[in-house]
Amino acid sequence: MGIENLKGSLLSEASGEAQKIVDSAQAHVDAMVEEERSKRAAMKKDAEKEVGKLLMEQRNERIAWARLESKRVIAEAREDAIKGVLEDFFDSMKTVRKSPEYKKFLNARVADALEELGAGATIHVVKGDKALTAVKNAKVVEDLEGLGGALVESADGKFRMNLTLETLFELRRDEVRKEIYEILFGGK
């Protein structure tokens, strides 16, 4: 029986040692699992922060793009409005020749041009404007195409003064656009 006792004692001791080893291993595994869980939670938190940061950057980028696009659309709408006013202006220019102000304007501009170019000049006007020009010492020819005004040519043909409404408008185009902008949009 001594061997049986010894065998039982050794088995019980080995079993106790094995249980201690298993418990120690289990504690070690539990610690490793807990460490991995905390690492995973930290990685998840970092990933969520990164995703949040990327989303915020993307949101800001889209907002900036939308603001830029809205400015472009507003600028295009303003440009269309200015073009519309200019088109209406040119349409109204077709009837300006019938006004008394046009006769005063035409005679004043032609007189100024004749002072500079001298007697014997040729004045080119639109058909129907010959009767509006009250000039002496100059030849008036109705051969001009356009909305109105005059083209005054020196007697020798070396110098010309273009006083057509189209040319006068082109010379002041930027000023007129600025004035239209001020009236339509209040200078903003």
Image (tube, grey):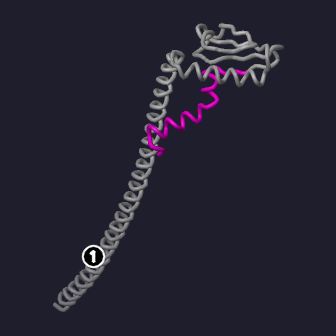
In the rendering, at what x and y percent does residue 17 appear?
A: 27, 84
The answer to which quarter of the image holds residue 101 is top right
Residue beneath label 1, please?
26
Indicate the amino acid at tag 1: Gln
Which residue does the image show at 48% across and 31% down from the upper left?
A: 82
Task: Work out whether residue 90 or residue 123 is closer to the camera in this orientation and state it.
Answer: 123
Task: Work out whether residue 120 or residue 180 is closer to the camera in this orientation and state it.
Answer: 120
In the rendering, at what x and y percent does residue 105 appear?
A: 60, 23
In the rendering, at what x and y percent does residue 139 appear?
A: 73, 9
Which residue does the image show at 16% across and 90% down from the upper left?
A: 1
Q: Is residue 18 left or right of residue 79?
A: left
Which residue does the image show at 76% across and 19% down from the upper left?
A: 160
Magenta residues (range): 161-188
Q: What is the total number of numbered labels drawn onto the structure image?
A: 1
Q: In this view, does 143 lie to the left or right of 86?
A: right
Q: Is residue 133 above or below residue 112?
A: above
Main secondary structure of the magenta stretch: helix
Magenta stretch holds residue 183: yes
The answer to which quarter of the image holds residue 124 is top right
